[in-house]
Amino acid sequence: MEKIAVYPGSFDPVTNGHVDIAERGLKLFDKIIVAILDNPIKKCLFTIEERLEMLESSFENYPDITVEAFNGLLVDYAVSRNCIAILRGMRAVSDFEYEFQLALMNRKLKREVQTVFLMTSLRWIFTSSSIIKEAAQFGGDITSMVPPLVNKKLKEKFGIGS
Ligand code: PNS
């Protein structure tokens, strides 16, 4: 049986750290579904369509990675897509509490779906969508931290010429 994992998140926007986690997830799973939470309540910089476009472009060379949007409970979505696991990246101790809570709640809701954590590569340990957005907003060079389309879109969003 094919082993499929869902890699969920807000991806506002996707960073090279996210790409690294999904890429390494393929060493454990046959397929990865990168799933963006479509939550109209959460204030995001990019629309769901923009985030889908950026993710699709970031994973265009990975036939075993697909990108989708979802709403509702993650574990229900995971089951509907035949996923056996939820894949999450963990950077530092600061991530632990939230991730632990999320994993335990998901396990309580659906015991058969496992949560698997991959430690972020040292290279991306300091990056996050939020800090990258902040740097980009004030003209910081974030070229090496995000996929090319994200770099372009961030510049457009903040009206910064390349
Ligand atoms: O990138 P993020 O914002 O840390 O991702 C959080 C995400 C999307 C994984 C989480 O908020 C989520 O799964 N939301 C869907 C609703 C749900 O199932 N929540 C967890 C159990 S209450």
Image (cartoon, grey):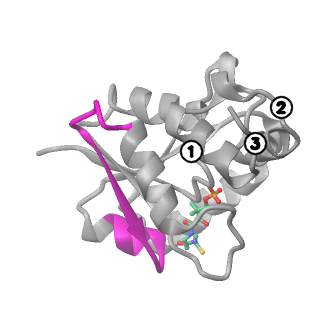
Give, as a single range, the part of the protein colored magenta.
Answer: 59-78
Q: Residue at x 61, y 21 (%)?
A: 121
Q: Which residue is mark 3?
A: 160
Q: Which residue is mark 2?
A: 140
Q: Which quarter of the rendering shows the C terminus?
A: top right
Q: State the SS at label 2.
A: loop
Front tag of 2 and 3: 3
**Any atom of ligand 1 within 8 Å of the CB at mark 3?**
no
Residue situated furthest top in the rendering:
123
Q: Residue at x 50, y 67 (%)?
A: 48
Q: For label 2, count other residues whose C-alpha is less than 10 Å away and answer few (under 14), some (14-19) or many (20+).
A: few
Quarter of image, res 125:
top right
Spatial CA distance of label 3 from label 1 is 19 Å
Identified by mark 2, the residue type is: Gly
Of the pair 126 and 15, the residue shown nearer to us: 15
Q: Which quarter of the rendering shows the N terminus?
A: top left
Q: For label 1, count other residues whose C-alpha is less than 10 Å away and answer few (under 14), some (14-19) or many (20+).
A: many
Say which label, 2 or 1, has the lower sequence index. 1
